[in-house]
Image (cartoon, rainbow, N blue to C red):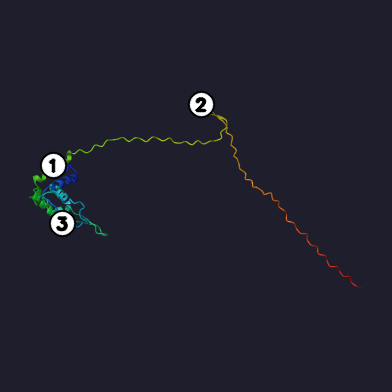
Amino acid sequence: MEAIYTVDPSDLIESVSKELQHVESIKAPPWAAFCKTGSHAERPPARPDWWYVRAASVMRKVLLKGPIGVAKLKHLYGGKKNRGHKPEQFREGSGNIARKVLQQLEKAGYLKQEAKGVHKGRVLTPAGKKVLTTAAEALLKIKPKEVKYTPIQEAPKLMKKVEVKKEVVSDKKVEVKGALVEKKAVAPVAKKVKVKTEAVSEKKVEAPTEKPAEVKEAPAKEEKKE
């Protein structure tokens, strides 16, 4: 019984659902291929074997919260309904699915009706507990795969390039790590300047000749007769 609580619920339900597929009294009805699990669901279940998964889940819920009936199962398997721009609201799951699953499990001998004080409903039988415990113990025996630890190798450090600035230094002695080093003066290097020379054509340029101005003779004055 302790193994049922320590095993992962999803793994337990998957293994139990495979065993329930071999039980003759537990079969999916013909309408299970296109029905939804509640008014909150938008589409039918995608898995073809979802009926057996739901039956295995109901067995686990009965073990944890039994005695339990259809009303509580409807609330447990409900969900939020998308109402467009309006806020979501909770809707209960399908009561027909919960009722049919309980009836089939009771017919297979995994459930029985019982009353504990005020609560009335179905409880697991020893046969139902055996199915859950054997599946849980089988899962515990499966050891997880050992992952080998490989230390991460550090990337090689890259050498940084150091830029050396060349400066004109006078003839002076400088101490570098206890050694005398003479620095010679570096004469500035004269830059070659390219002078563009324009080619002049050898054609003679004649100066414009001015025409001599024509001199107009003044008219002769007539002598006055006395």
Q: Nearer the viewer, residue 47 or 130?
A: 47
Relative depth, front residue between 225 and 170: 225
What crowding class fits label 1: few (fewer than 14 Cα within 10 Å), some (14-19), or many (20 or more)? some
Circle 3 — which element? helix
Q: CA distance from mark 2 to mark 1?
A: 85 Å
Judged left or right of residue 184, residue 138 is left
Horizontal and vertical percent position of residue 185: 57, 32
**How far is the residue under mark 3 from the one under mark 2?**
98 Å
Residue linked to disc 1: 134
Observer able to see residue 116: no
The residue lying furthest to the top in this view is 179
Q: Earlier in the sequence, mark 3 or mark 1?
A: 3
For residue 26, side relative to residue 166 (left or right): left
Q: Residue at x 11, y 43 (%)?
A: 130
Which residue bears the numbered disc 3? 31
Measure the C-alpha gap from mark 3 to mark 1.
32 Å
Q: Which of disc 1 and disc 2 is earlier in sequence?
A: 1
Q: Which amino acid does the dot numbered 1 rest on?
A: Thr
Secondary structure state at the residue bearing disc 2: strand
Q: Position of residue 12 (x, y in %)?
A: 17, 44
Q: Is residue 179 visible?
A: yes
Q: Position of residue 94 (x, y in %)?
A: 16, 56
Label 2 vs label 1, nearer the camera: 1
Q: Residue at x 13, y 44 (%)?
A: 132
Q: Locate residue 189, reporting x and y percent.
A: 59, 37
Q: Which mark is residue 179?
A: 2
